[in-house]
Image: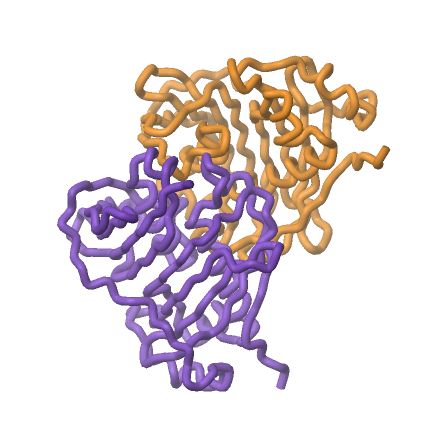
Chain colours: A purple, B orange
Amino acid sequence: MKEMKKSWEDEYSVPFGEVDTKNEVFLSHLWNLMQETAWNHATHLKVGYSDLGEQKYFWVLSRLFIQMDEYPRWGDKIRVKTWLAGMGRLFALRNFSVINPKGKIISTARSAWLVLDLKNRRPQRVEPLFKRILPLLDRPAEAEEPEKIHDSVHPREENLFKVRYSDIDMHHHVNNTKYIEWILDSYPFEMHRKCYIHTFEINFLAESSHGDEISVHTEPFGDSPPAFLHSVFRKGDGRELCRARASWKPID
Amino acid sequence: MKEMKKSWEDEYSVPFGEVDTKNEVFLSHLWNLMQETAWNHATHLKVGYSDLGEQKYFWVLSRLFIQMDEYPRWGDKIRVKTWLAGMGRLFALRNFSVINPKGKIISTARSAWLVLDLKNRRPQRVEPLFKRILPLLDRPAEAEEPEKIHDSVHPREENLFKVRYSDIDMHHHVNNTKYIEWILDSYPFEMHRKCYIHTFEINFLAESSHGDEISVHTEPFGDSPPAFLHSVFRKGDGRELCRARASWKPID
């Protein structure tokens, strides 16, 4: 049997179109790169998109926690490393680090994934599905499940978005990066000019699709450093689609 | 003097987050990759972002014509090739091809660029600025300037967008890829399901910035194959920001 790699690394270059006015990568793009690396590792382990597809299942992101210590800039070559961090009843846990050319870890992330049935969109128990890759996990597992966000939001501000063609992915639902984009787009431009996101965490609760009207609720959560709670709803049926928490740091 | 390369090639892999429900790359993302390759070539020729920045100038896309014969899919490794195609009074012309792993050209593009003064945003004459790279142009120049779109639009449909933080780039204006995204997002989802863009051309006329309200006007232009004219306006002052033309082909 071919050796299964415990971790996977890919190199990327940050494009001009994916940095903001401060020449810092958009968080949604960085998460896109992390996910792509995860797909590559999953494919190598034969638990990728088509492997699961054959069994009429698909991966879906449930929880994510990202910490940004330094933002890569346009043209920066970064390495993204990912590995399995644990396997619960319903969650497969996957961690990430982003490494700059000097070998310094500038960002880390923890993520929890569900396996859904393509037909009824119900979560499956993951351990029986992935017995083959369980030996890759160190015991005791370094499982650091991203937290569940319990706080509900008492909105001080509401921002509206409409799901567009470019928001929809191969699963025919809104791509998870888009919720991150909507949440960050809800802040005043001044905030992005003066501060940067230090930690960002998000829990996904339901799917949305083309044409849905989306409302991002925001409530201040802490002052120093500034932190905010977010809740994203579908206007049509009032369904909560995700919940997020962001902490910022002022730019020196 | 170090040899100047007449053309430049980069390889990319199409990420999951940049394909649509049909598993075809978003046109805006493909154009992003083409532009990145152009930046890399320009930097090699010492006419890149920082070279121009030192003289208080910056590149801005004026006209673009893309033809799509085949769409790369998630995970496809594609090579993007670019070269200078001519130099007019105000335009520097740059062409592209996108090559699949079998060596087949699946997409081509022609683009015309202006050099603007950072302070007054006025176009500069390009030939005197780029004397050094003129020897790279074949004479007679293979200049194929993307056409000026003369037709004005009698809108049958209007779609509204608001400029978000994630739309703004290092020049503090809306990134040119976003206009392509808005225009394609203006079509009904059914259109994207049944057809694909065969040719897309766009002329950029003015800049827009954060918070601007944008209106995309659409008028049918031809039936078989379906073709449409677009005009993008800023609601605030009625300024026309760009004009585009798209021709579609039904999916077999």
**Location of residue A23 in the rendering, given as x and y in whole percent from the top left corner:** 50, 39
Q: Position of residue A105 (x, y in %)?
A: 52, 60
Quadrant in which residue A251 is drawn: top left
Q: Residue at x 55, y 39 (%)?
A: A16
The quadrant holding residue A151 is bottom left
Q: Nearer the viewer, residue A40 or B196?
A: A40
Give the residue displayed 56% in from the left and 26% down from the top.
B61
Looking at the image, the residue that sits furthest to the left is A154
**Residue A173: horizontal and vertical position, in percent?**
34, 55
- Residue lying at the far right of the rendered structure: B1
User: In the picture, residue B229 is in which quadrant?
Assistant: top left
Residue B44 in the image, given as x and y percentages of width and height:
73, 36
Residue B85 visible in the picture: yes
In this rendering, the count of numbered labels is 0
Left or right: where A27 falls relative to A236: right
**Can you say which quadrant of the picture contains the N terminus of chain A?**
bottom right
A208 sits left or right of A131 in the view: left
| Residue in front for this viewpoint, A245 or B17 | A245
- Residue, x 33% and y 15% (percent of image)? B237
Q: Residue at x 50, y 71 (%)?
A: A83
Q: Is residue B18 above or below residue B64?
A: below
Locate the C terminus of chain A by quadrant.
top left
**Relative to B226, does residue B240 appear above or below in the rendering?**
above
Depth check: give the residue in front, B82 or B183: B82
Q: Is residue B225 visible?
A: no
Work out whether residue B204 or residue A4 is closer to the camera in this orientation and state it: A4
Left or right relative to A147: residue B109: right
